[in-house]
Amino acid sequence: MRRLLLTAALPALMLGACATLDAAPAAPLETPMAEAAPSPYLPTDLSPAGVRAADDHLALEQVNGDEAMAFVRGENQRSLAALTGDPRYETYRREAEAILTATDRIPGPGFLGEGIGNFWQDAANPKGVWRRTTLDGYAAADTRWETLLDIDALARAEGRDWVWKGSDCLAPDETRCLIFLSDGGKDALFVREFDTTTKRFVDGGFTLPEGKHRIEWLDRDTLLVATDFGQENGHGTLTESGYPYIVKALKRGQTLAQATEVYRGDASDGGYGVSPSVYRDAQGRPTAVIVTRPLDTYRQETWELVDGRPVKLELPERVNIYGVQGGSLIVSPDEDWSRQGRDYKAGSLLAICIPCLRATTGPAVLSNQADVIFQPTDRQSIGGVRVMNDRVVVAISDNVVGRLVVFQNRGEFGWPRTDIATPENISVSLGDASKGSGRFFYSVEGFLTPPTLSLADVDDGSTRVLRQGPARFDASTHVVEQFQAASSDGTMIPYFVVRPKTLVLNGQAPTILFGYGGFQVAKPPAYIPEMGKLWLERGGVFVNANMRGGSEFGPAWHRAVLKEHRQLAFDDFAAIARDLIRRGITSPEHLGIYGRSNGGVLTSVSVTQHPELFNAAVIESPLIDMLRYHELPAGASWIGEYGDPRIPEEAAYIARYSAYQHLRPGVDYPRVYITTNTRDDRVHPGHARKFAARLGDLGADHLYYEETAGGHSNDADPVANARRWARHYVYLAQQLMD
């Protein structure tokens, strides 16, 4: 059944390439359906035991269990028939594959010794090749690449489904590298030492078995390793989330059992595991060794290894560390912070001398260094930082558009800034940086503007365009506008609309509303070529929500929806949906939503709370059963974001929105598309499976598809990724265009 039309067609403001914000009149949101009547699936006993007892689909949490895989096979068969059997599918697949495997894509560069390194995937090399060239060679029209490691060949030779997950090369020459390989796309990785001079793995070199490692080079013969060290004195060496809490120094030739402990957290630690970081000067010499111990998703202790012994640094628990410069730690606190009579605003960028931070009973260490590098306004935030020899490069988000600034360290005389000119109404992304050369890469892009990659030199202030991405779709037909909508508490939530220039405001436009809203992840303007080709070129509208939970306006924008305040994020999203309808851009019949990972929390909740607003939802790699998420690896690491269901008062507010428990009989839910990956060891596939199964119990029409390889990030194979996007857009076209 089609959704009830709620459209009141109003004229929208035509503002060219990007509109300024205008305010929608504040109006209270309707009561979420989750609150209208209790669901029969919501347990009265919210204890872990009570939630488990009320769950009739626990078998689907067994990743490779017989019942679970039988369910997957049945659902996959039905969904593939509906999606790949659509006459549009093959066209969409070909178009997406042409984009994702195009040989004229910008090769992402990274400094590698005296040259440039790049990992490349295309139709001939779907698993990819790691390769290098010179800087001049990279800038040339016809770049000549030297292959270092062919992952396709390696996978064939070893009979493994290897997926490249990056490298870490030891400065300054960067000839010895740690190579990270995933079996099928999982977050858990194998580690091998590689020699770029011989282009071979090192015989007898460093190797680590599969695990969620945290590794840093200390020197050529020593690694700092946080990993699963097995049983010690009858106890494991991983947290309940499956992450390490012990750091050891591993010498060349040693086994993990022989490594020397340098830091120990606790098995009860939250977050993503204890992590060592080695900061170096331009010559590759270590200047500081820092260990962070996560207390939960966002709070951490910060320790420095001094002469091999850990010393606690007096930093706030919510802090981002970007590097070391001249004996100072470059940090940004995510909370207001006071020290030595100074007050620092959350979200500011600071340089604090490291000895000044060491906990000591002696006299306080003072410094003449000017400590405030940058303090954002209420509508600004830090989008990225690169620490150079005497300068700090900062990408700034200013009302969700990008700025690029270089700050020079003048000691007690402050941090004078130099702005690097960038186009208007775009986003700015920082790439790799080299202290040795004083250069860094950066790129600019917009919804309708392909990326441009440039190289900047902080010493002479020069910039050089290296590559310009070709247009992958006809952008001449569309325009970008920025609006804002009033959420349930009156907060104005910005969003971008990418729409046809000739759009008639009659509520008929097929529209995708994209959102994430969590984990301090901002969603600035981005060039999404497959979306442009498969959706915009066919007359569709794309909407990008900058809802709370992200970092668009600094740490407070994120904190506003943590834990017991989570409903506000869902209200933000619903407010944007209603604003799109109010403006006459679309209607519930033609409005679909898309979100993945934490965006899967958002889309599943949106469907259960406001099914009347949407006619489609792509729910990808989702968290959905929020009353059991902490029991599904690696769920407990996110307690700082959502709360702890084991604590009664926190279980109570989580239970108000957990979509799995709020599905109800007799509700006209839209036909949703739920998709996940068997190899996803970050967000457990059980979430998606159980939601689909419960929809099936209710007789609600839905599609479910589970890919068997690729992991959470879906980056294993561009050819497979093209099929994924084709399925997405076939479904969205069926629901919103047909």
Image (cartoon, grey):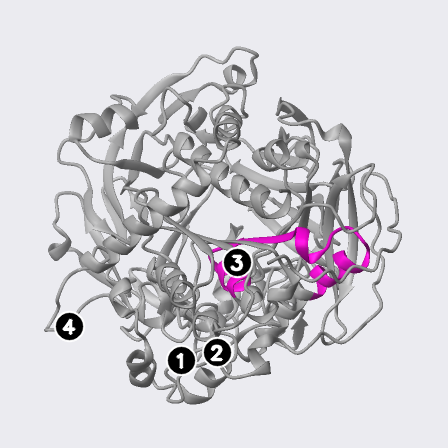
Q: Give the number of the mark in front: 1 or 4.
A: 1
Q: CA distance from mark 4 to mark 3?
A: 36 Å
Q: Which residue is mark 1?
A: 645
Q: Which mark is residue 235?
A: 4
Residue 578 part of the magenta-drawn span: yes
Callout 4 secondary element: loop
11 displayed left or right of 205: right
Asked if marks 4 and 3 touch (Cβ < 8 Å), the reply is: no
Task: Give the mark nearest the N terminus, 1 or 4.
Answer: 4
Inspect the image, locate mark 4, and give the three-letter code of the amino acid beneath it.
Answer: His
Q: Position of residue 569 (x, y in %)?
A: 61, 68
Asked if marks 1 and 4 touch (Cβ < 8 Å), the reply is: no
Asked if marks 2 and 1 touch (Cβ < 8 Å), the reply is: yes
For the record, the magenta segment spans 575-604
Inspect the image, locate mark 1, and give the three-letter code of the amino acid beneath it.
Answer: Pro
Residue at 47% across, 31% down: 111
Q: Which residue is mark 2?
A: 654
Inspect the image, locate mark 2, and give the three-letter code of the amino acid beneath it.
Answer: Ile
Q: Which residue is mark 3?
A: 599
Task: Give the mark nearest the N terminus, 4 or 3.
Answer: 4
Label 2: few (<14), some or many (≥20) within 10 Å? many
Residue 377 part of the magenta-drawn span: no
